Image (cartoon, rainbow, N blue to C red):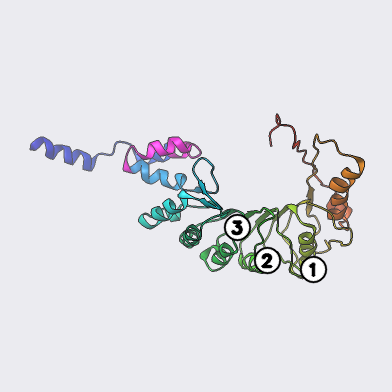
Amino acid sequence: MALRRSERIFKRNHRRIPNEISSMIIDNLADNFPALRNLALVCKDFAALAQPHIFRYIDLANDPSENTVVGPVCSYPRVRRLESLLESSKIHQFVQRLDLSSDRISSDELEVMTRILHLLTSLTRISMRDPESRLFMEIENSSLVGTLKRLRIDSSFRYNWNVASFQRILISLSCLEVLAICGSPEFLEPGAFSLPSSLRMASFTGIRADWLCAIGEGLKIVPLPFLHTLVLDPLFADRESDIGWDGLRIGTHIVYRLHITNAPYSNSDYQMMRVLPFIFATRGIEVSKLAPIVCTFCRLYDSSSSR
């Protein structure tokens, strides 16, 4: 009995590792997720210190090794697991970055995903693959409008999200600094497409010509005084339209992605696929703005090269 009492006193008054040393250990392993996960199992002190690093970034996007496809519907098991974890713990305060996909998602899991967006109150970065318009509406009505700083949209052409809804969410994001859109549906809405005035960097790759024209018109209405870098990579050219870049501030760096492949292009194909989109996207940009163009070489047909 006396021995048990002394053991309890020892455990209550004696810490095995001081807080300062524990913090140093965790900080040195901040980017080593497997080590952090194992360390969190050692004791409650390590678990408490490791959680902000472990749950800083959560990936709910399509993972072929985990997700299952049943007919036209794709299942995302991580979505339900995350909701359960958020409801039973306080990890929501640690999640800063979220990757998600709604490609062929079921209506039930889409509903769960919308609830997750409202629970993650500390998010600063979101990457969305083939987003449903419902997700735009939920972000607009959540606390993310005041915290989100980076937004990436990857979209295949079979997805026609509601452009008006996407426009509203962008304008509502008062702190958005980086916007990247890769691929886009057809722009069926006439007129301009305005971007948040807080943007510092914008990237439009694999994007339709009508979207770029609408963005140019939007710049005339809402200039971007803080934009320092604009990345362009249009899918095709529009010979009948011009993009109005007058809304760009002086000193904005224009980065144009130039693709070089091993495919046997004819002269006419090269003109259509490479030269005309370049002329279309950069026509009207002042020389001082166009000077810092950077070319990215992508050998799409060379299996030995990295992508």
**Residue drawn 72% across the image and 66% down it:** 194
Question: Label 3 amino acid?
Answer: Pro
Q: Residue at x 59, y 64 (%)?
A: 136
Q: Position of residue 211 (x, y in %)?
A: 76, 61
* Discs 1, 2 touching: Cβ within 8 Å: no
Q: Position of residue 180 (x, y in %)?
A: 67, 53
Q: Which residue is mark 2?
A: 163
Residue 276's place in the image compared with 1, above or below, is: below
- Mark 3, other Cα within 10 Å: few <14 / some 14–19 / many ≥20: many
Viewport quadrant of the C terminus: top right
Q: Is residue 157 positioned above or below 54 on the image?
A: below
- Characterize the local packing of mark 1: few (<14), some (14-19) or many (20 or more) Cα atoms within 10 angstroms: some
- Front residue of 300/173: it is 300
- On residue 131, which mark appears? 3
State which mark lies toward you, 3 or 1. 3
Q: Position of residue 59 (x, y in %)?
A: 52, 47
Determine the CA span between mark 3 and mark 1.
28 Å
- Magenta highlight on residue 39: yes
Residue 72 in the figure: left or right of residue 77: right
Q: Which residues are magenta?
A: 26-44
Disc number placed over residue 302 in the picture, else none: none
Instruction: Give the residue pinned by disc 1.
Output: 220
- Taking the view exactly as shown, the residue that stands out farthest to the top is 304
| Residue 21 shows in this picture | no
Q: Residue at x 70, y 31 (%)?
A: 303
